[in-house]
């Protein structure tokens, strides 16, 4: 069989993760393929999807396109630009079991080829080696402190004052604060560029630290990027490396630490479950603190060193994965060639392209919102559509509600909650551009009405230019039903921040009773009523008080039940409580939960539906009723840390994603 001619691409020229992927992938593939230029290649093999977007259709037509998934697929599916890559790529290569599972859940086939590590660079040296001892003395690192390392960036280059939340520097900071509060003698060793946010936080918190670099007020990418052999010395120097990311493909730091025989703990992101022992994976800062305390007192993590090292060598060197690349290229002719058809309605613009279209003096975009609006209090979908209307108006968009006109550039349809017959009649005579917002599946939320789901997906196939799915959970459930939404993008809901915010909220006071609250518009039992009743029967009422706002399937004796109230009143009540509890089942993207998070309440949530995506590290899950009370104790015991880790989608950002989609479909 002839060796395929392959153009290998996808680096960013910075020298970070994707450039290292490009180099190591080349080493693994060289025995199998002929690496060539784009013009003569039969196959375009990219290690990063973004790198494909710079090529024109003409350059790629007739070629088989393979692309690595260097991060978490569900996160990339929240980016409108990623849809363009989805149309380009004929076959995906995943790097972790997490990524492979996510694509499989969406009905997308992939080959799993693990991340790679250069073990000639990252290797054990020993803490008493001359290189390590010299480095310790050069930087005057304390010999009696437990050294905690972090060498990943924590800010974006464009905004050096705000944390890059996906990398979790705020999660790491809560771990360091907790260790310091417990009187543990730690010393933080930071390295690498763009550490501005964490350095300022460490200084403000009085936490001992050393920055291996040259502090700079501006972007320090050029002056503080360290050679990899220096990073290897640092891994051999520190007592522990901490990965605190919210989402990852790798990170490479996990393999670098493992190959250097450095103790490492991580959130359950990316390849952490593939490489690390379960005892080295933490779910929240208090878990990480417990692990560190155990390591300091009893060398808890030492037994993981050899296992991590062996896995890195056995599974993650270029020569280890060459057989996996061979398996891929033995079947390469099965991959469809790119035909030049990228999407259902024209080419997909990037965010930058869309922004460039906004020229002074241009006629405002006219958007038709199709939803039956109700004055609150009402359901979550209604709340969001009201917020979206406000967000679009703030961006200078002309919004028309439930109107039909050739003057309207694009329509946003809310599931099936609009006058479908009127819309169908108009569509028979006019070309329309439609963004279809889908929740549900309805039958999973209500326990019935499956025919409404099927009706919704028929409308989607008939009208949609693009589909907004409210969570990755929604996407998976729709695929489970056998449907493929048109041009899907995952966009969480957002709330009106003028109403739902944490301004002037009542401070948490551990000397008083902890104030719990739940809310719901619907009285369907799937909204959690039976669980709230169980809590009422088992709660320690000497420590807690509990309020329920809205409609419930149960009658309460001790829970203070308040009927539905307007949004402003609900927001004020949320700000006067401490912890939000939701037990709703199959809830795709709970607006009630987002409202509570936006008002500064950590959440205790049923580990189901879209709840985990919304809460992140701003709360704790429960899988069964017997876990509720212990998780409540954990939340109350480390309340401020959970509260500081709350993140919610901003209405401005959510509106921008909708507007990007709108501009794409009207091109």
Image: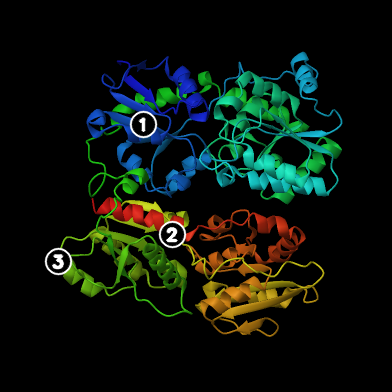
Nearest to N terminus: mark 1 or mark 3: 1
**Above-or-below relation of 82 to 68:** below
Q: Which mark, residue 66?
A: 1
Q: Quadrant of the N terminus?
A: top left
Q: Is residue 607 left or right of residue 70?
A: right
Q: Residues within 10 Å of mark 1 (few under 14, many from 20)?
A: many
Q: Quadrant of residue 44?
A: top left
Residue wearing tag 2: 470
Could you tell which of marks 2 and 1 lies nearer the N-terminus? 1
Q: Is residue 408 above or below residue 57?
A: below
Of badges 1 and 3, nearer the viewer stands: 3
Q: Position of residue 362 (x, y in %)?
A: 25, 55
Q: Which sits earlier in the primary sequence, circle 3 or circle 2?
A: 3
Residue shown at 58% from the left, 56% from the top:
647
Mark linked to residue 47: none
The answer for how far apart the CA atoms under marks 1 and 3 are is 40 Å
Q: Are marks 2 and 1 in contact (CB under 8 Å)?
A: no
Give SS at disc 3.
loop
Q: Position of residue 81 (x, y in %)?
A: 37, 44
**Is residue 482 visible to us here?**
no
Q: Along the line of sight, which residue is nearer the eye, 302 or 54? A: 54
Contact check, label 1 and label 3, Cβ < 8 Å? no
Name the one closer to the observer, 588 or 182.
182
For label 3, the residue is: 428
Give the CA separation, mark 3 to mark 2.
Answer: 28 Å
Left or right of residue 217, residue 633 in this image: right
Q: Nearer the viewer, residue 225 or 43?
A: 225
Q: Residues within 10 Å of mark 2 (few under 14, many from 20)?
A: many
Q: Report helix, strand or loop for mark 1.
A: strand
Whether residue 664 is visible, yes or no, is yes
């Amino acid at each position: 069989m002839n060796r395929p001619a392959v153009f290998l691409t996808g680096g960013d020229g910075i020298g970070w993760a994707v450039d290292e992927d490009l180099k190591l992938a080349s080493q693994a593939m060289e025995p199998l393929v002929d690496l060539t230029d784009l013009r003569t290649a039969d196959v375009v093999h990219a290690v990063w999807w973004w790198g494909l977007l710079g090529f024109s259709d003409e350059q790629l037509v007739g070629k088989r396109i393979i692309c690595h998934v260097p991060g978490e697929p569900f996160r990339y599916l929240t980016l409108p630009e990623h849809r363009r890559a989805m149309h380009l790529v004929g076959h995906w290569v995943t790097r972790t079991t997490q990524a492979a599972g996510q694509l499989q859940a969406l009905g997308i086939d992939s080959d799993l080829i693990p991340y790679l590590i250069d073990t000639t660079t990252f290797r054990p040296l020993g803490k008493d080696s001359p290189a390590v001892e010299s480095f310790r003395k050069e930087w005057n690192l304390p010999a009696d402190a437990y050294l905690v390392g972090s060498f990943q960036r924590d800010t974006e280059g464009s905004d050096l004052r705000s944390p890059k939340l996906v990398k979790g520097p705020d999660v790491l900071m809560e771990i360091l604060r907790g260790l310091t509060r417990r009187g543990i003698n730690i010393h933080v060793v930071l390295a690498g560029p763009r550490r501005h946010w964490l350095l300022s936080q460490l200084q403000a918190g009085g936490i001992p630290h050393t920055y291996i670099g040259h502090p700079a007020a501006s972007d320090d990418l050029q002056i503080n990027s360290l050679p990899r052999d220096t990073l290897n010395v640092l891994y051999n120097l520190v007592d522990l490396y901490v990965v605190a990311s919210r989402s990852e493909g790798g990170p490479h730091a996990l393999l670098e630490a493992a190959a250097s025989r450095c103790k490492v703990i991580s959130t359950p992101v990316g390849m952490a479950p593939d490489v690390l022992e379960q005892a080295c994976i933490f779910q929240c800062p208090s878990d990480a603190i417990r692990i560190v305390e155990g390591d300091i007192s009893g060398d808890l993590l030492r037994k993981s060193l050899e296992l991590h090292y062996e896995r890195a060598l056995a599974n993650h060197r270029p020569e280890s994965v060459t057989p996996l690349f061979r398996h891929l290229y033995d079947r390469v002719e099965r991959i469809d060639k790119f035909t030049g058809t990228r999407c259902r309605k024209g080419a997909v613009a990037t965010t930058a392209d869309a922004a460039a279209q906004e020229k002074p003096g241009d006629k405002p975009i006219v958007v038709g919102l199709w939803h039956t609006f109700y004055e609150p209090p009402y359901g979550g979908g209604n709340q969001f559509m009201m917020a979206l209307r406000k967000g679009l108006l703030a961006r200078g968009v002309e919004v028309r509600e439930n109107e039909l006109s050739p003057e309207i550039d694009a329509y946003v349809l809310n599931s099936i909650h609009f006058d479908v017959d009127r819309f169908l009649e108009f569509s028979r005579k006019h070309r329309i551009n439609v963004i279809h917002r889908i929740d549900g599946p309805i039958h999973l939320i209500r326990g019935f009405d499956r025919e409404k789901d099927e009706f919704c997906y028929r409308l989607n196939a008939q009208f949609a230019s693009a589909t907004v799915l409210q969570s990755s959970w929604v996407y998976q459930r729709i695929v489970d039903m056998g449907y493929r939404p048109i041009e899907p993008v995952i966009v969480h809901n957002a709330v009106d921040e003028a109403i739902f915010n944490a301004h002037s909220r009542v401070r948490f006071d551990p000397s008083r009773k902890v104030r719990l609250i739940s809310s719901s518009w619907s009285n369907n039992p799937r909204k959690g009523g039976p669980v709230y009743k169980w809590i009422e029967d088992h709660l320690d009422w000497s420590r807690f008080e509990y309020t329920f706002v809205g409609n419930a399937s149960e009658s309460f004796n001790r829970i203070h039940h308040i009927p539905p109230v307007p949004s402003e009143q609900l927001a004020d009540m949320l700000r006067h409580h401490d912890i939000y509890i939701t037990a709703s089942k199959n809830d795709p993207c709970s607006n009630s939960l987002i409202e509570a998070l936006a008002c500064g309440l950590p959440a205790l949530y049923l580990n189901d539906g879209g709840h985990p995506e919304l809460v992140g590290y701003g709360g704790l899950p429960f899988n069964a009723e017997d876990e509720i009370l212990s998780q409540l104790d954990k939340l109350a015991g480390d309340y401020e840390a959970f509260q500081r880790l709350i993140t919610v989608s901003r209405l401005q950002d959510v509106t921008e994603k909708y507007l990007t989609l709108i501009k794409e479909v009207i091109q």
